[in-house]
Image: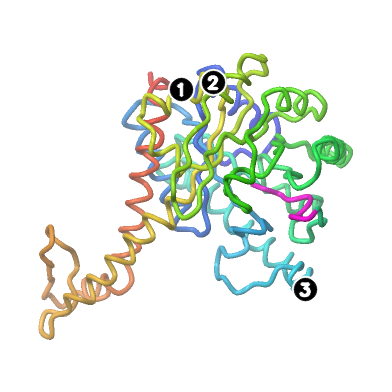
């Protein structure tokens, strides 16, 4: 079905995952190629496993102080307001980008327009910072812009740079603001900066299970991100603190946890990845592997194409193992493919294959008929 943005529909997607002890895969994007690839891989998995309305999340950060995804949807030339950028110019860029992105998502998941209509897709606003490091109020988010947040199914209100008690107050106030505005959203909180996200693993303590229970009770939030050591720097796996997850489960908060830091999770054996759902992880963010692994493979393919340019045959249109394959016809498509299409298609296929693998490792096959 088409993109789901309303509160009830989004709740239903998470509830279906919770009812099946399944971790919802939420994949990050920065451009249209990523969106197509993510949806393509998930749809193929749905068809192969006879899954109707496969639940899937797609996310982007906005003004995250480390990584801004949505602002660079078309190009990387932008300046954050906290760095001197014009707030009006910045907002216009974000409004344009989010409309373009959600138009693509809605079209690709609408069976009237594509072959990918077997996906229940939600769009998540990730790491919406209330405060930046040092407790500074962020000027780089549009958390209170009604016209902007209508394009999202759920929002992560990140006040992890405030003391715990202030975080509780600010998180609860944001929920009340959304309700007063008539724009309820599935809300996700964060207690502390996830390990290695900024100051490093040693400076970021793991979540205390009792704090998770208090946070959910006092804020009324639907979801919360525990710090279980899964974040990474430059793709270095940091491991998963299973004892933290087990401690949270013992408190009976239910399937309300979202895990960040896919670099560590993807190094786990599939049986361990399937443990996340029964331990309360109803969602998982994955993005870093796209630029770090697949981006590198795309660069290597581009370099290989240029390396094997032949003065008579031109550029290779494909590779048979290590051997370049040429097309000596006068077909203009074959001529332009290495220049415009080949690396693009490789990137899309690699991301789609990775999404397929992620869904399988998390145990999505249990949703099949």
Secondary structure of the residue carrying numbered label 2 = loop
For discs 1 and 3, the disc positioned in front in the rendered view: 1
Q: Nearer the viewer, residue 303 or 244?
A: 244
- Residue 330 located left or right of residue 80: left
Instruction: Identify the residue under disc 1.
Output: 275
Residue drawn at the location 52% of the way across and 42% of the way down = 261
Left or right of 125? Residue 30 is left
- Badge 2 crowding class, 10 Å Cα cut-off, few under 14, some 14 to 19, many 20 or more, is many
Distance between the alpha carbons at the discs numbered 2 and 1: 6 Å
Does the magenta stretch mainly form a helix, a strand or a loop? strand
Find residue 268 and report its horizontal and vertical position in percent: 39, 33
Q: Write the start and end of the magenta stretch as one range.
A: 126-134
Q: Secondary structure at mark 1?
A: loop
State yes or no: residue 61 in magenta. no
Q: Residue at x 41, y 50 (%)?
A: 37
The mark nearer the N terminus, 2 or 3, is 3
Q: CA distance from mark 1 to mark 3?
A: 46 Å
Q: Which residue bears the numbered disc 2?
A: 279
Sequence-wise, the earlier of marks 1 and 3 is 3
Q: Which mark is residue 86?
A: 3
How far is disc 2 from disc 3 in space, using C-alphas?
44 Å
Residue at image x 13%, y 62%? 322
Q: Nearer the viewer, mark 2 or mark 3?
A: 2
* Residue nearest the observer in this picture, 112 or 232: 232
């Amino acid at each position: 079905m088409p993109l789901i943005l309303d509160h009830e529909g989004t709740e239903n997607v998470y509830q279906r995952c919770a009812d099946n002890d399944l971790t919802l895969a939420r994949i990050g994007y920065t451009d249209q190629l990523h969106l197509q690839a993510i949806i393509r891989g998930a749809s193929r998995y749905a068809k192969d496993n006879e899954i109707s309305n496969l639940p899937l999340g797609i996310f982007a950060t906005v003004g995250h102080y480390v990584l801004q995804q949505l602002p660079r949807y078309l190009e990387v030339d932008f300046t954050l307001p906290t760095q001197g950028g014009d707030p009006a110019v910045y907002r216009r860029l974000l409004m344009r980008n989010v409309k373009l992105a959600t138009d693509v998502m809605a079209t690709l998941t609408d069976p009237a327009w594509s072959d990918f209509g077997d996906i229940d897709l939600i769009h998540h606003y990730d790491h919406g910072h209330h405060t930046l490091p040092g407790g500074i109020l962020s000027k780089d988010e549009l958390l209170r812009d009604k016209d902007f947040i209508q394009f999202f199914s759920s929002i992560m209100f990140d006040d992890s740079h405030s003391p715990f008690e202030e975080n509780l107050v600010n998180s609860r106030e944001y929920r009340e603001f959304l309700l007063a505005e008539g724009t309820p959203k599935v809300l996700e909180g964060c207690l502390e900066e996830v390990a290695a996200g900024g100051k490093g693993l040693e400076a970021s303590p793991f979540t205390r299970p009792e704090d998770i229970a208090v946070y959910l009770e006092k804020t009324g939030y639907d979801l919360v991100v525990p710090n279980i050591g899964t974040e990474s720097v430059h793709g270095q796996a940091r491991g998963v603190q299973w004892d933290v997850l087990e401690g949270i489960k013992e408190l009976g908060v239910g399937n309300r946890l979202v895990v960040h830091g896919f670099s560590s999770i993807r190094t786990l054996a599939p049986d361990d990845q399937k443990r996340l759902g029964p331990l309360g992880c109803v969602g998982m963010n994955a993005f870093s592997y796209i630029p770090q692994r697949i981006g590198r493979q795309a660069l290597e393919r581009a370099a290989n194409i240029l390396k094997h340019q032949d003065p008579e045959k031109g550029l290779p249109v494909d590779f048979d193992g290590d051997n370049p394959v040429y097309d000596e016809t006068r077909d203009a498509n074959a001529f332009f493919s290495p220049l415009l299409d080949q690396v693009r298609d490789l990137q899309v296929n690699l991301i789609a294959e990775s999404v397929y693998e992620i869904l399988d490792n998390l145990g999505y096959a249990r949703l099949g008929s």
